[in-house]
Image: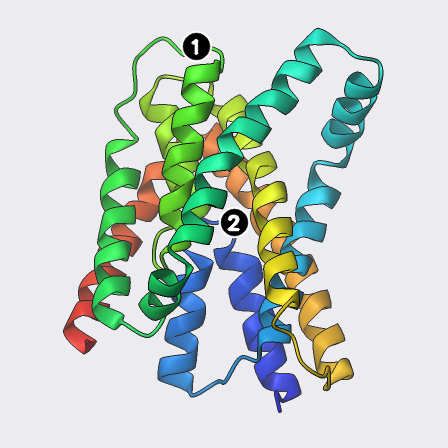
Amino acid sequence: MVSFIEAIILGVIQGVTEWLPISSSGHLVLAQELLGITQPLIFDIILHLGSLIALIVVFRKELVELVKGIIQRKREDLQYLGWIIFATIPIAVVGLLFNKQITMAFTNLTVIGIAFLFTAFVLLISRWPKKKQQKLTWRSTIVMGIMQAFALVPGVSRSGITISTGLLQGREREATARFAFFLFIPAIVGAIILEFSSLGAVTDLSALALATFVTIIVGILSLRLLLYIIKKQKFSYFGWYCLFLGIVVLILA
């Protein structure tokens, strides 16, 4: 059973950490370890679903335009869809082949601490991209997709690793962020489908609804905040937080 207070805590953690480059999975594991919150599988699904809804709300105009362009067979939009599909393949393959090892990582604080340090390193070096920003290409998006697979490990931030990879390749900031967030859609839909296959009886409907609502609201605010931070070129600052947290987790491990 998850109480209303625990549902709110989980919703806030998911809503903030899914989008800010500090790893939602790592923080949720720490919440369970430090606060003693037991998170049923259905809550994991609901929290991810809430994050997905928040993303759709924030990027609704861009998503509608993309869908229209695909239906109308516009070359640019079809190419963008192709980028998303091919960039999603690495995380799908890694997730299926190493599911057991990834699951074990969620109970290993040493792995999580090292993962936070890895995220910190990538974020901190993202401040030194090429001076001239370039448009996204097949190569740059595939590399972002490959790096996204590392985010399956708790402590590695999905948004942090993908956006930093784009920035390090000298790609346009806002275009890189948008593509990184669009990559979230197929990845999280796939994860939800896999988790549903192991789902048992559903209880605590009121707590589930509360967690979903909190995740959506906090997620929308966090996502808009991150877009502002990226625009102001302050993205790498999150690396210091991940560095501190990684050291703390390794000490606790």
For this orientation, the residue located farthest to the front is 97
Residue at mark 1: 134
Is 205 positioned to the left or the right of 233 in the image?
right
Q: Quadrant of residue 74?
A: top right
**Label ID, residue 19:** 2
For this orientation, the residue located farthest to the left is 251
Q: Position of residue 24 (x, y in %)?
A: 46, 60
Amino acid type indicated by mark 2: Trp
Front-lying residue, 25 or 86: 86
Q: Position of residue 246 (x, y in %)?
A: 23, 61
Amino acid type indicated by mark 1: Gln
Q: Kindly tell me whether residue 155 is visible in this rendering.
A: yes
Element assignment for label 2? loop
Classify the position of the N terminus by image quarter: bottom right
Q: Position of residue 150 (x, y in %)?
A: 35, 46
Q: Quadrant of residue 102?
A: bottom left
Among numbered discs 1 and 2, the one appearing first in the sequence: 2
Element assignment for label 1? loop
Q: Kindly tell me whether residue 21 is visible in this rendering.
A: no
89 to 97, vertically: above or below: above
208 to 91, vertically: above or below: below
